[in-house]
């Protein structure tokens, strides 16, 4: 697999547009899922994915094949997402304390007027994915990245250390502390842990009332699921997960939206991108 990626890379830096497109398509789902978990909202993840793809393409010649291509892309994406300031959550940092208080006070009846006759199980499933994604925003950006890479993407600790430019030992120590923090919150509040006081179905009415859930626009339910192997590019598993990590580890991975694929094709058809890839002399067709 890696030899095929390197072959695409060699052709791409020589100006082969099809090879460049294939190279970017091989990592677009990975970039989108990392962006989604880091930023909390699908719309923000789409914007960030497009911007990261531009960075990957414009910095392509800097890749030296000293690591897997996906590791190099992870590093670019991680640096970008840690410093991303355009989201609502970046402007108004959440905390586990605030989120816990919201859960304590956030239950109202699921009336037909609120649910708009949409199946409550479907709404509860949507809320589960939205809630767990937003819950991650209670962590600071670097802690969030450490947790997402280790628990949700199952990236090897050595590779995580390379991405974050810290030792594998330092990474494992930080991940252990973050897991403990997240695990304590989940065990007290999240019903998926079997011990928490919250229940997705019981929270549906409140989520709709506070406009956190729109029965007519179920973003997560409408996303296409990705093959796990598309996202989990690394074969080495990290140390055994704590008992609460499964709440996040079992969340689905998604295919990046069609709009991103269209963006890639349009991007590669622009004159500026042809200059970057060495094809500026070709006739541009629309």
Image (tube, rainbow, N blue to C red):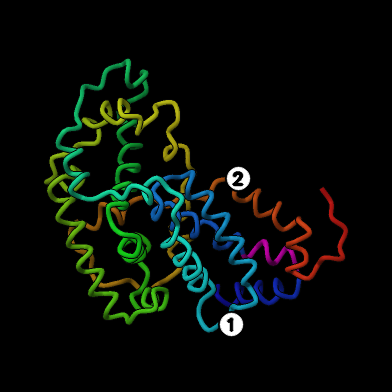
Q: Which residue is mark 2?
A: 259
Q: Quadrant of residue 237?
A: bottom left
Q: Decide if residue 230 is on the left or right side of residue 212.
A: right
Q: Quadrant of residue 147?
A: bottom left
In the image, residue 182 lies at what x, y percent?
21, 57
Is residue 269 located in the magenta-colored stretch of the structure?
no
Q: How many marks?
A: 2
Q: Label the magenta part by its dominant secondary structure.
A: helix
Residue pictured at 41% horizontal, 52% vertical: 39
Mark 1 and mark 2 lie on one chain; the one further toward the N terminus is 1
Q: 69 or 105, which lies in front? A: 105
Is residue 22 located in the magenta-colored stretch of the structure?
yes
**In the image, residue 12 above or below residue 93:** below
Q: 84 or 146, which lies in front? A: 84
Q: Quadrant of the N terminus?
A: bottom right
Q: Secondary structure at mark 2?
A: helix
**In the image, residue 79 above or below residue 92:** below
Q: Are marks 1 and 2 in contact (CB under 8 Å)?
A: no
Q: CA distance from mark 1 to mark 2?
A: 30 Å
Residue pictured at 25% horizontal, 72% vertical: 239
Q: 281 or 245, which lies in front? A: 281
**In the image, residue 75 above or below residue 137:** below
In the image, residue 120 lies at what x, y percent?
30, 27
Q: Which residue is mark 1?
A: 64
Q: Quadrant of residue 124?
A: top left
Residue pictured at 27% horizontal, 52% vertical: 138
Which circle marks residue 82 in the picture? none
In the image, residue 104 lies at what x, y percent?
14, 37
Residue pictured at 20% horizontal, 38% vertical: 102
Q: Which residues are magenta?
A: 16-23
């Amino acid at each position: 697999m890696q030899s095929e990626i390197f072959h695409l890379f060699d052709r791409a830096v020589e100006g082969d547009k099809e090879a460049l497109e294939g190279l970017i398509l091989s990592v677009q789902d990975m970039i989108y899922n990392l962006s989604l978990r880091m930023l909390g909202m699908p719309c923000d993840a789409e914007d960030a994915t497009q911007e990261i793809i531009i960075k990957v393409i414009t910095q392509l010649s800097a890749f030296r094949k000293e690591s897997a291509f996906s590791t190099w892309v992870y590093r670019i994406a991680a640096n970008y997402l840690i410093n991303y300031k355009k989201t609502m959550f970046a402007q108004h940092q959440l905390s586990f304390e605030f989120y816990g208080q919201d859960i304590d006070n956030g239950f109202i009846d699921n009336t037909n007027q609120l649910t708009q006759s949409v199946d409550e199980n479907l709404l509860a499933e949507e809320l589960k994915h939205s809630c767990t994604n937003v819950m991650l925003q209670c962590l600071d950006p670097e802690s969030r990245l450490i947790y997402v890479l280790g628990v949700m993407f199952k990236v090897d600790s050595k590779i995580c250390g390379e991405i974050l430019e810290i030792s594998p030992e330092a990474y494992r120590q930080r991940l252990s502390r973050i897991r403990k923090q997240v695990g304590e919150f989940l065990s007290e509040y999240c019903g998926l842990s079997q011990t928490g006081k919250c229940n997705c179905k019981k929270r549906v009415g409140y989520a709709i009332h506070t406009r956190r859930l729109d029965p007519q626009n179920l973003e997560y339910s409408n996303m296409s699921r990705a093959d796990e192997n598309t996202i989990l590019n690394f074969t080495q598993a990290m140390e055994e997960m704590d008992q609460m990590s499964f709440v996040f580890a079992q969340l689905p991975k998604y295919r990046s939206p069609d709009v991103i694929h269209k963006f890639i094709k349009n991007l590669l058809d622009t004159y500026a991108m042809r200059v970057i890839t060495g094809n500026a002399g070709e006739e541009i067709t629309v």
